[in-house]
Image (tube, grey):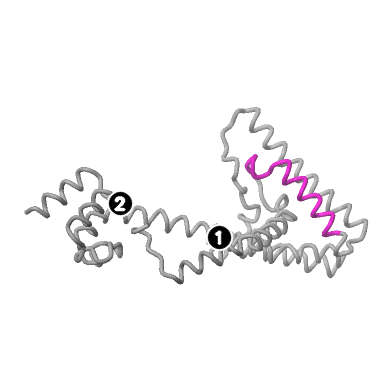
Amino acid sequence: MIDQPKTTIHGIQQALRDSARGPQAAILFVADLGFALMMPLLRRNLGENFFSPFLILVMGIFAIAMCAVFKVSPVFISIYLGIIAIASLYHSIVIAKRNRRDEEWYSWYEGDFNIEPLVRKLPKGNDYWFREIVYEPALVLLVGFFIGKLLDPGLGSVFLFSAPWMMLRGMYARMQHRKSILAARDQKIIAEQKLAAISGAPVDETKGYVVKNINNMRPHDKEALAKQMLNEPDFASLSSTSKA
């Protein structure tokens, strides 16, 4: 597209992204699972689609698998899975009550942070992404360290395994969020500046949005492009300016 030009490097980058989509999806899946191991204990007011029966099932299977991998003692397996089950039941009841009240709630909401009261007065404690990328994983890491030292090394290892994947998941979510903001901002700039850009205004007047080589285009090409890009009032305005 003319309003979203790409260099060959961008094309190669996109091809690499496409070819890496499978491994990337696998990494993100593990990151989600790492988060799921702790999520029922860390969040509240979850959305119904986010905390779905399928997620609960996968989370339970993965939790059991990780306990086996890290050789958690049977007593602490029972304690950990019991706490996860109680927390999951609590979230399911909250969702069911919300539905009974016919209360509208964003179904993909990932929940309020339970650590919010603890970190609110810490540096960047009110920053959503800092909580998700730094404070939540740090809490899990700290708890895992003490569980490993004082109670059961295997269960501590489950927590220590979860923490970096939680951080990775948060970083990826932040990156995607930033990309969506930039895309929205670009569309706003295009909507505001395309008339000026196709009129050949300098780049410092169009917030960086340009139609390349517009001043050297043949009149018919420029007219065809303008008709495609502009609405009728802007096209009429450009046509009258060109004739003048």
- Separation of disc 2 and disc 1 at Cα? 30 Å
Quarter holding the C terminus is bottom left
On screen, residue 77 versus residue 135, left or right, reads right
Camera-side residue of 187 and 18: 18
Nearer the camera: disc 2 or disc 1: 2
| Residue that mark 1 sits on | 129
Is 48 within the magenta? yes
- Which mark, residue 73? none
Camera-side residue of 147 and 22: 22
Image location (x, y in percent) of residue 90: 74, 41
Q: Are marks 2 and 1 in contact (CB under 8 Å)?
A: no
| Residue that mark 2 sits on | 191
Residue sitting at x 15%, y 48%: 237
Q: Amino acid at mark 1?
A: Trp
Quarter holding the N terminus is bottom left
Looking at the image, is 225 positioned above or below residue 171?
A: above
Residue range corresponding to the magenta coloring: 45-67
Is 35 within the magenta? no
Residue sitting at x 60%, y 28%: 102
Q: Quadrant of residue 148?
A: bottom right
Image location (x, y in percent) of residue 221: 22, 57
Provide the secondary structure element on which disc 1 rests.
Answer: helix
Residue sitting at x 81%, y 66%: 157
Image location (x, y in percent) of residue 186: 37, 57
Provide the secondary structure element on which disc 2 rests.
Answer: helix
Image location (x, y in percent) of residue 50: 65, 45
On screen, residue 181 versus residue 218, left or right, reads right
Q: Amino acid at mark 2?
A: Ala
Packing grade of label 2 (10 A; few <14, some 14-19, many >=20) is few
User: Which SS does the magenta portion mostly show?
Assistant: helix
